[in-house]
Image: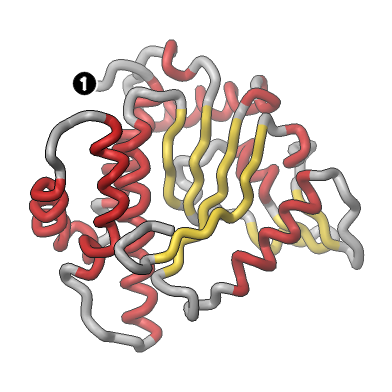
Amino acid sequence: MTSNLIEQLRASSIQSLLKIKKFKEGLPARTAFIKSKLGGRSRAEIIQLGNYLSEAFLLLGRKDRSQGGLSSAGAVWEALVVWYLNLCLAGTKAVCLRGGSLCPAPIKDAITIMYESIALRSEPDVMVISFPELDTQPPVASGQEMMSILDMIAEQRFQKIGVINVQCKTNWNDNAQIPMLWNMLYNQARRGAVIPNGFGIGRRGMTLNNAGFLATHLPLFQHKKRVH
C-alpha cells in the first residue's frame, strides 16, 4: 500500500515497465548485479548506482544492430533509466514516467509540437515531473481516479510544476541529432519566442513558458559505465 498519491504514481510507473518483455526478462539478473554494487542504503549510495547503470544494461546485451534490435535495446535502456531515477526520487515530490499513459494531459498539451493545426509530436519519451502538494494527497482506489486527480492538479498548479524531458539513447550514433533539434525548438518555446514557418509548441492554452521550470531533452547515453 502506497503512502500518498506521488508514491502511487511512482508504483504505477515502475509497474508499467514490466510490460516491456525484454526488460522484465532481464530484471532479476540486473537487480542482482545492482544489489552487488550497493554497499548500503543511504541516498548517496543509491545515487552512485548510476555509475553502474551501463554495466547493468550491457549485462544481457547482444551485438544486434538491426532496426528491431536497436528498438528493443532502446526500450530496455529507457526502462532502466526510469527505474533508476524513481529509485533516486523515492520519498520526494518528483516522479519519472515513461511514455504518455501516465503523463497528465496538461503537460502533454504543453510539450506538443504543432505545425499549423496538426500535432506532430505529443507523446513524451521519458519525463521527470515535480508536483506540488502531491505528497499530501492520499492514494486512490483506481488508476483512472489517479489520472483524473493528476490532470486537475496539473492544470490548476501548472506554474508550480517542474518538468524535465529526458531523451535516452544507447549511444551517440543512434540519431543523437534528433534530441538536439527538439531541444532547440523547446528552448525557443520556453523563452516565449515565436517559431517561424507555422510551427509552434503547446495547445489548448498550455505553454512551456508558464511551467515552473523546464529542462528540455536532457540526453542520457549508455556510455563508459555512466548514465551521461
Q: How many labels does the image show?
A: 1
Q: Is residue 58 left or right of residue 97?
A: left
- Write the residue at 90% across / 53% down: 194
Indicate the position of residue 73 as horizontal and vertical percent values: 32, 71
Question: What kind of element bears circle 1?
Answer: loop
Q: Quadrant of the C terminus?
A: bottom left
Indicate the position of residue 70 as horizontal and vertical percent values: 37, 78
Above or below, 30 relative to 175: above
| Residue 116 sits in quarter | bottom right
Q: What residue type is labelled 1?
A: Met
Residue 32 or 49: which is nearer the viewer? 49
Above or below, 136 relative to 122: above
Residue 131 or 156: which is nearer the viewer? 131
| Residue 25 sits in quarter | bottom left
Q: In this view, does 217 lie to the left or right of 39?
A: right
- Write the residue at 26% across / 21% down: 2
Q: Which residue lies furthest to the bottom in this view?
A: 66
Q: How is the image coloured?
A: secondary structure
- Write the residue at 24% across / 52% down: 18
Indicate the position of residue 171 as horizontal and vertical percent values: 42, 73
Q: Quadrant of the N terminus?
A: top left
Above or below, 3 relative to 224: above
* Label 1: few (<14), some (14–19) or many (≥20) C-alpha neighbours in 10 Å: few
Q: In this view, does 120 lie to the left or right of 140?
A: right
Q: Mark 1 points at which residue?
A: 1
- Write the residue at 32% across / 81% down: 69
| Residue 52 sits in quarter | bottom left
Indicate the position of residue 212 as horizontal and vertical percent values: 67, 30
